[in-house]
Image (spheres, rainbow, N blue to C red):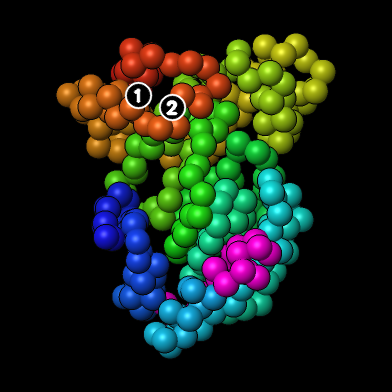
Amino acid sequence: MTHRMIFNQTGYFGRGAITHIAPEIARRGLTKAFIVTDPVLADNGTAARITNLLDEAGIGWEVFSDVVPNPPIEKVQAGLAAFRASGADVLIGLGGGSPQDTCKAISVIATNPDFEDVLSLEGLSPTTRPGAPIIGVPTTAGTASETTINYVITDTSKQRKFVCVDPHDIPVMAFNAEHTGEKYRDIAAAFGVEEARTMPLEEARAAAVEAVAQLTRDLGNPTRISQVGVEADGIEALADDAFADVCTPGNPRPATREDIKALYTSLL
């Protein structure tokens, strides 16, 4: 059975969900897909399941499979060059986190040249204003990142295709900081914080949190959950859903329902 979900965009999940890809592309008046995947899925017939559907619908396509785990910027740049050369007008991310992250980064940079030098880190997704349209086809379940409790507050603005830095990311980063070892140094360094590698760890963590917060402000992304339609009477339900989420136990710092509720409340 296929299920249909509406967030800031439309999502399908369940058996047969990929049959909706071509109709969704056609409905938007798009004509050629650029499929970002990894070598295994490109070679084992998984990508062909999508390209066959595109062929049947008369939609052009090109496959980019030069994706590796925790994709470095060089791979993103290679994908970006291939995307630009392809003439495609829609991206399809096929696979787990690495193809999805690479696909999102290509979309971001393709429509925001200022982000040509964006860095890709484990647990830190490139973030910006709307990118090229993306269809994601995950093949593995996600896990909670180092920076977020894995419950997404959807941006209801139709001006955005996706939002990778959500209003709750910054306080959750701060909440998790003491349980992340040296990893926030990597984030601070990626944002150009001077002496990120040598300053006291507590200062590096604070600098990383502030760098992400400043990026959120610079991009004009929401900084309060009230900006994306959340009201005080919705906090209890959000806390329940986030606490029950399958990924929450994987958060770097154990979080109680009351912890989560407090985080949401602080962002009203």
Residue labelled with disc 1: 243
Q: Which mark is residue 248?
A: 2
Q: Position of residue 70 (x, y in %)?
A: 68, 46
Q: Read off the magenta span.
A: 30-47
Decide if residue 27 is on the left or right side of residue 172: left
Locate the C terminus by quadrant: top left
As for residue 176 lying within the magenta part, the answer is no
Residues under labels 2 and 1: Cα distance? 6 Å
What is the three-letter code of the residue carrying label 2? Answer: Thr
Number of other residues with Cα within 10 Å of mark 1, as a class: few under 14, some 14 to 19, many 20 or more: many
- Would you place residue 12 above or below residue 29 in this image? above
Number of other residues with Cα within 10 Å of mark 2, as a class: few under 14, some 14 to 19, many 20 or more: many
Instruction: Check if mark 2's residue and mark 1's residue have beta carbons within 8 Å.
Output: yes
Q: Position of residue 46 (x, y in %)?
A: 54, 68
Is residue 114 visible to us here? no
- SS for tag 1? helix
Q: Position of residue 223 (x, y in %)?
A: 41, 31
Query: Residue, x 68% and y 59% (percent of image)?
Result: 67
Query: Residue, x 38% and y 37% (percent of image)?
Result: 152
150 or 84: which is nearer to us? 150
254 or 264: which is nearer to us? 254
